[in-house]
Amino acid sequence: MGTGADVRDILELTGGDNDGGPISKKDIINSDKKKAKKTTETLTFKRPEGMHREVYALLYSDKKDAPPLLPSDTTQGYRTVKAKLGCKKVRPWKWMPFANPARRDGAIFHHWRRVAEEGKDYPFARFNKTVQVPVYSEQEYQMYLHDDGWTKNETDHLFDLCKRFDLRFIVIHDRYDHQQYRKRSVEDLKERYYTICGKLAKVRSATGTEPKIYVFDAGHERRRKEQLERLFNRTPEQVAEEEYLVQELRKIETRKKEREKKAQDLQKLITAADTTTEMRRAERKATKKKLPQKRETEKPAVPETAGIKFPDFKSAGVTLRSQRMKLPSSVGQKKIKAIEQILTEQGVDLNPMPTEEIVQMFNELRSDLVLLYELKQAHSNCEYEQQMLRHRYDALLKAGGTAPPQAEGPGLESQSWPGADDIKTEAKEQIIDVVGAPLTPNSRKRRESASSSSSIKKVKKP
């Protein structure tokens, strides 16, 4: 039940804390906190009507102070925790000399370092890694490393540069003394170095162990660089022609995959037709032999390999026989319309009387019709592809400058394909360039230039 103090609190009226209500134990205990809260409260000023909140926030703050001219941080205390400094003494530092072991000139440098670390090695000396270049003696060179194309002094000069520049052969080739010795390529320097390393590893290895030998193929490296140079020096016409040929190759590969897929589908249709006929023959023979016996179980309407797979109604409950005549949802609308068109042309009722025998025969008929429709479609696709290939072959023959041989015969349309001997003779007479192949941009330009030059020669002859 509410008291007078609650009502005055809701209406924001001033008055005593306990006016009109009993004093409880909590009011006595928390009397100091309530007084402290009231002293800290500040008067709030309402925003004038028609003034936006953002503009009012710029003019006044909660304490009705003027807006600051400069940004200031009013938060009290440090943003980060103060550093806790101990009472111990600071470790002393000293300006002391040091030498870098990577340098051979004995240079001495100075830096600040803790007194406790005086006399220790330079800490960055551990990053001074060098390549272990093998060293050979005079006897080993004469016995195993002698080469007619290289002298002893030239080999020593090469190994000295390898040790100085850590096997950076581009730098070694740049610093190589080509005036005193023969002019060598980078591949020659690498080949000489790695052959000597391999021979020394074989000679110095223990008996019964196979050392790890690095082999450098200089010929392969030269061919690789030559190929890269040719690739870099291509003209824009050659780049465009290569891109065109790559696109044509991709088209050929996609067409090949499509043909293989269509051939697989056609083979599946043919095997399905053969298996359905064989299964029906076997069923007829079995039914003739087992005429007096009763049917124990109801067989499926159509085998699985047929064009349409009708569902089996073996669930519990009452079902109508006419439900077995409904086409499944997997059959498309085109096939359904083709089945209906053929049935109407042959004068077959679309919804016959659903007896046991009629249902089975009608489902088999429609399955055969679907199989026939798919075979006809595959046959038309094959004929279309054959015509396209024939036209393309004729276009290639015309582009090559030879006409296809004519022949008479039934079903050939006064045209016959060339034999193996004709193709061999044409291949011997005419050399086809891959870059300037027929139906490519550069080949057309070459044919046009060749035809213009031949016409000029004909004019000059008389």
Image (cartoon, grey):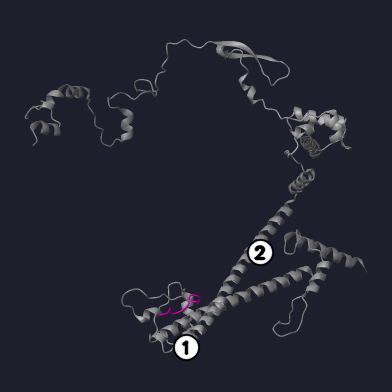
On the picture, is 458 further left or further right than 368?
right
On the picture, is 96 further left or further right than 13?
right
Between residues 269 and 54, which one lies in front from this camera angle? 269
Label 2 packing within 10 angstroms: few (<14), some (14-19), many (20+)? few
Toward the front, the furthest residue is: 208
C-alpha distance separating marks 2 and 1: 56 Å
Q: Is residue 30 above or below residue 263?
A: above
Which residue bears the numbered disc 1? Answer: 289
Q: Quadrant of the C terminus?
A: bottom right
Question: Does residue 176 appear anywhere in the picture?
Answer: no
Magenta-colored span:
298-307
Residue at 30% in and 23% down: 65
Q: Secondary structure at mark 1?
A: helix
Q: How many marks?
A: 2
Residue at 15% in and 31% down: 12
Going by the numbered disc 1, the residue's amino acid type is Lys
Please give the label number shown on residue 252.
Answer: 2
Residue 87 appears at what percent x and percent y?
42, 11
Residue 175 appears at what percent x and percent y?
79, 30
Between residues 196 and 454, which one lies in front from this camera angle? 196
